[in-house]
Amino acid sequence: MATNDRPEISDLVIAYDPRTLERLPVRRDEVVAELERHGMRAAVRVVSPWPHRDGILDAGFVDGVLLRAHHELQRLSEEFRQGERMRGLLAPLLDVLRAAGAPGPYRVVDVGCGLGYVVRWLAAHGNLGADVELVGCDYNAPFIRFASALAAEEGLACRFVVANAFRLDEPATLFTSTGVIHHFRGEGLDRFLAEQGASEATAFVHCDTKPSYLAPLGSLLFHQARMREPLARHDGVLSAARAHPGEALLAAARAGCPGFALGVYDGEREILPVLKVMHSLVGVRRHLAAAYVARLGPLARRLGALE
Amino acid sequence: MIPLLLASLAILDATFAGFRAAAGRDARIFKRAYYRRALLTGAGSGALLVAVLAVATGLALVASPDPGALYGDLLAIGARMLQVFLGYAILVLGALALYATARMELRILATVSILGPFTLLRPAVVVAATAWGAIPSRSPAAIALTLASSGSVLLLGRILDHRYGRGALGGPARPA
């Protein structure tokens, strides 16, 4: 079975009703069976000792593991300057909207925000303007509670909601995500992008690990060095192997978002792929694409053709 | 000069161990004070360790029938260990300087190609330096002191990490 068909542990140990977003019980033996079906012995060793009640994984324990893993993930996001990278692509988009006279406020909705690091970083350092609302969405209620508490503690102008980002009462102007899009596979990726194509959003930026021949080795070394939680080490390494190539993202986005001009920022292949370890799928409504490229300035070279 | 350099490197290593122990445990955005405290905790622990090792070395010298020979042996071991440690330290400090000052892509180059992998290699570097330093020695006391010093430097990193993990060193609210 191909590595990129293998599930991450975090995709299996937590489940939600897609309609109500209510947390569903997860049977440990079913998780283990799924991991064994993929021949993932290391992952089986991670999950097998987890506590359960009548076969149902202890939700509190799972939350604790995921929270610790996301703390470690934030450390990586800090080191890889994810907030700064997102700001570099978002700020010109917002400038273009203002110049085009689009009515505000401009709502930036981060999909699958986790602990909301990028949203909180943008609120703290982004200087995106008073007409910008920053919203983080995730199905995971403990993440959202924690993100909200952190934002409140530091007085950051952003909010977090347990919600489907595509079903908000106040719809998004821009969708963003970081390290999320590789969780959507096959038809799931098509649906994820089609939701944005059908939405009122003006643009989206989805940043993720850039696949390369060095990414699996680099990811293995890096996660061993930086992560403590076995789940974080396992899923971090696997996520580099599961990252979508830029061409695959573009193909899925072209099918799902016909009204958008599309490009992959930092998408070009490099001989030594250690300078640009992330890439971003960027979609902009076609009538704004030329203005966005102009507003990006020197960064436009790294986006390549937006078409 | 050799004892001074070794002591300085041990304290520097402990300072970074303090940072590593704290990293990935605090999800706030503004945490300069949190990291400053972690660095100081590491440095203080390192200084304490150096003091304890200095006392142990002093006692060994006092107890030795030939203190001059033992001290000479320790200096020779230390000089060989520095050949490894200084190379490692220059590489890591250079990468840190690049990370602190360069543009984003070069910062990522520093972290991906040096800071991450060489953090992982640190225990192996300590073991290699210890072997390189101690194997030519014929003094059991000098070898024992070297092994105790290297072992305690590695152990200190584990202790700091463990204590941060248990919340024993304070910090913000964290998941259980």
Image (spheres, coloured by chain):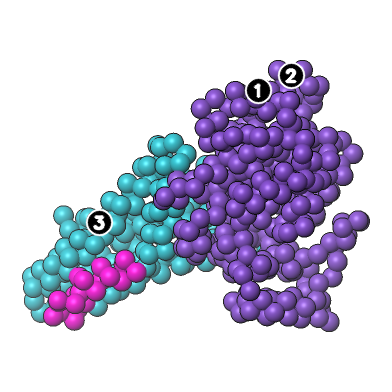
Chain colours: A purple, B cyan
Q: Residue at x 77, y 39 (%)?
A: A258
Q: Residue at x 47, y 63 (%)?
A: A217
Observer-side mark, 3 or 2, equals 2
User: Would you name the residue on which mark 2 appears?
Assistant: A100
User: Would you name the residue on which mark 3 appears?
Assistant: B87
How many C-alpha atoms fall within 10 Å of the one at disc 3: few (<14), some, or many (≥20)? few
Front position in the image: A35 or B48? A35
Q: Give yes or no for residue A244 being in the magenta stretch.
A: no
- Which disc is residue A291 wearing? 1
> How far across and how far down the image is residue A56, in percent?
81, 76
Tag 2: residue type? Ala
Left or right: residue A4 versus residue A106 is left
- Which disc is residue B166 wearing? none
- Residue stretch in magenta: B124-143
Question: Does dot 2 land on a helix, a strand or a loop?
Answer: loop
Asked whether the beta carbons under mark 1 and mark 2 sit within 8 Å of each other, the answer is yes
Q: Chain of mark 1?
A: A
Q: Chain of mark 3?
A: B
How many C-alpha atoms fall within 10 Å of the one at disc 1: few (<14), some, or many (≥20)? some
Left or right: residue B145 versus residue A257 is left
**Residue A280 visible to the viewer:** yes
> How far across and how far down the image is residue B4, in percent?
21, 55
* Residue A1, quarter of the rendered image: bottom right
How many C-alpha atoms fall within 10 Å of the one at disc 2: few (<14), some, or many (≥20)? few
**Residue A79 visible to the viewer:** no
